[in-house]
């Protein structure tokens, strides 16, 4: 069995400003949120993969902190959540400023929780 690739290729990311704007403007309102994240969801029929965009503001922390949070989100999404999300969704995940002080365990719990709240995944413990 071939091991699962560890990358987060461009094909599964939102990269362009207009892609983010479409999710914000035409997606489900209001966004789903919890203590750590705002999740914007846009349903786009007929696409082969779901796409994820991540936004972390400078108020969250310096570049080291922001990159660490993005890395954690990509890893959790790739290893735990991506297989459960239907392919017709474009998602934008906005990070709250208080995540900079949270542990990795809390971060993963909050991320999984916001996806469950949006009805995108069903995680059984």
Image (cartoon, grey):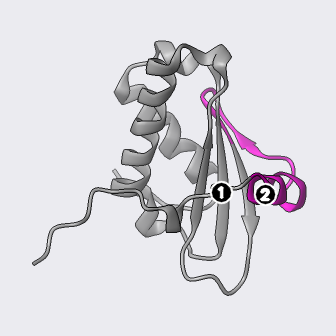
Name the disc covering residue 23, or none. 2
The residue lying at 65 percent from left, 19 percent from top is 58
Q: Is residue 57 left or right of residue 72?
A: right
2 or 1: tag closer to the N-terminus: 2
Pointer 1: what residue? 91
Q: CA distance from mark 2 to mark 1?
A: 7 Å
Q: Is residue 20 above or below residue 85?
A: above
Work out whether 3 lies above or below 65: below
Residue 105: which quarter of the image?
top left
Given residues 29 and 94, the one toward you in this image is 94
Judge from the rendering whether residue 18 lies leftward or rightward of residue 123; answer left or right.
right
Identify the residue shown where x is 67% and y is 50%: 92
Q: Residue at x 48, y 12 (%)?
A: 101
How many other residues sit within 10 Å of disc 2, few (<14), some (14-19) or many (≥20)? many
> Badge 1: how crowded within 10 Å, few (<14), some, or many (20+)?
many
Mark 1 lies on a secondary structure that is strand
The furthest residue to the left: 1
The question of residue 119 being in magenta is answered with: no
Disc 2 element: helix
Was residue 20 drawn as part of the magenta stretch in this picture? yes
Residue drawn at x 53%, y 14% as measured from the top left: 62
- In the picture, residue 109 is in which quadrant? top left
Q: Quadrant of residue 6?
A: bottom left
Residue 30 horizontal/vertical position (percent): 85, 47
Q: Which residues are magenta?
A: 17-38
Q: Are marks 2 and 1 in contact (CB under 8 Å)?
A: yes
């Amino acid at each position: 069995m071939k091991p699962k690739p560890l990358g987060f290729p461009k094909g599964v990311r939102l990269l362009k400003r207009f892609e983010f704007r479409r999710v914000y403007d035409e997606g489900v309102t209001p966004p789903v949120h919890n203590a750590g994240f705002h999740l914007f969801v846009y349903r786009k029929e007929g696409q082969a993969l779901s796409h994820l965009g991540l936004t972390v503001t400078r108020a969250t922390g310096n570049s080291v902190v922001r990159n660490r949070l993005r890395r954690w989100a990509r890893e959790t999404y790739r290893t735990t959540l991506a297989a459960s999300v239907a392919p017709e969704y474009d998602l934008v995940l906005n990070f709250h400023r208080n995540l900079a002080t949270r542990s990795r365990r809390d971060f993963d719990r909050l991320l999984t929780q916001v996806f469950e709240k949006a009805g995108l995944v069903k995680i059984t413990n």
